[in-house]
């Protein structure tokens, strides 16, 4: 009986350690960014990633070739493409979404914020537009094939307390 209790305790300790270490490990991942040498918004996105704990290397060679090799269609394209832990990240995807994606490890090509929406990391300014972070499931998927991974709407009313009430439930939109 004591052996069973020890195994149970050991398993609980390991699980707790993984819950603490896994998010930190994903933030220390190295991100390789392919971008134009003259694109200032790409530089700002790189700074955003570094500010969120990622190690970033840049390749100032443009991103058309790497986007195509990564399986990202032109309809999901943006100004830079990043590679991290076997995934492709296209455009101004927020670091928190990338961290969550790396923790979840879905079967997918990667994430994309197509085009260059105002208000995304690296595109901050006076204007902020609603936008979606899209998950690309299969190589070559078009925008209509992608799945919404997260939504951002700066014009939506803010809720005072987003935590679920005791006994309530919380629904997560993808």
Image (cartoon, grey):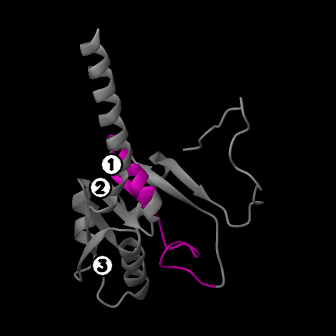
The mark closer to the camera, 1 or 3, is 1
Which quarter of the image is occupied by the C terminus?
top right
- For the N terminus, give its image quadrant: top left
Q: Closest to the observer: 33 or 138?
A: 33
Q: Is residue 85 visible?
A: yes
Q: Secondary structure at mark 3?
A: loop
In the rendered image, which residue does mark 2 sit on?
25
Report, in whole angstroms, how far the alpha carbon at label 1 lies from the one at label 3.
29 Å
User: Where 33 sits versus 146, above or below?
Assistant: below
Mark earlier in primary sequence (3, 2): 2
Residue 96 at x, y = what percent? 46, 60
> Which residue does the image show at 37% across and 52% down from the upper left?
23
Q: Secondary structure at mark 1?
A: helix
Q: Are marks 2 and 1 in contact (CB under 8 Å)?
A: yes
Residue extending farthest front: 2
Residue 112 location, quadrant: bottom left
Name the residue carrying label 3: 35
Q: Earlier in the sequence, mark 1 or mark 3?
A: 1
- Can residue 108 be found in the magenta stretch? yes
Instruction: Measuring from the top left, give residue 140's x and y in whole percent.
Output: 32, 51
Instruction: Give percent across and percent down for residue 14.
Output: 29, 35
Per the image, label 2 sits on a secondary structure element best described as: helix
Magenta extent: 97-125
Instruction: Residue 14: say if magenta.
Output: no
Question: Which residue has dot 1 on it?
Answer: 22
In the orientation shown, which residue stands out farthest toward the top?
1
Query: What is the residue that sits farthest to the bottom in this orientation?
Result: 38
């Amino acid at each position: 009986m004591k052996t069973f209790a020890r195994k149970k305790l050991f398993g609980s300790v390991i699980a707790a350690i993984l819950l603490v270490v896994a998010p930190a490990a994903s933030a220390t991942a190295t991100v390789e960014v392919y971008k134009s040498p003259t694109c200032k918004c790409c530089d700002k996105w790189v700074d955003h990633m570094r500010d969120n704990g990622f190690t970033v290397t840049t390749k100032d060679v443009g991103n058309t070739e790497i986007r195509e090799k990564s399986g990202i269609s032109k309809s999901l394209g943006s100004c830079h493409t990043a590679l991290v832990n076997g995934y492709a990240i296209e455009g101004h995807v927020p670091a928190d979404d990338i961290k969550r994606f790396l923790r979840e490890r879905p079967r997918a090509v990667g994430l994309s914020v197509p085009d260059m929406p105002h208000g995304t990391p690296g595109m901050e300014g006076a204007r902020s537009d609603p936008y979606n972070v899209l998950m690309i499931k299969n190589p070559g998927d078009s925008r209509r094939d992608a799945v919404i991974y997260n939504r951002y709407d700066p014009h939506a009313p803010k809720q005072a307390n987003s935590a679920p009430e005791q006994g309530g439930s919380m629904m997560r939109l993808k």
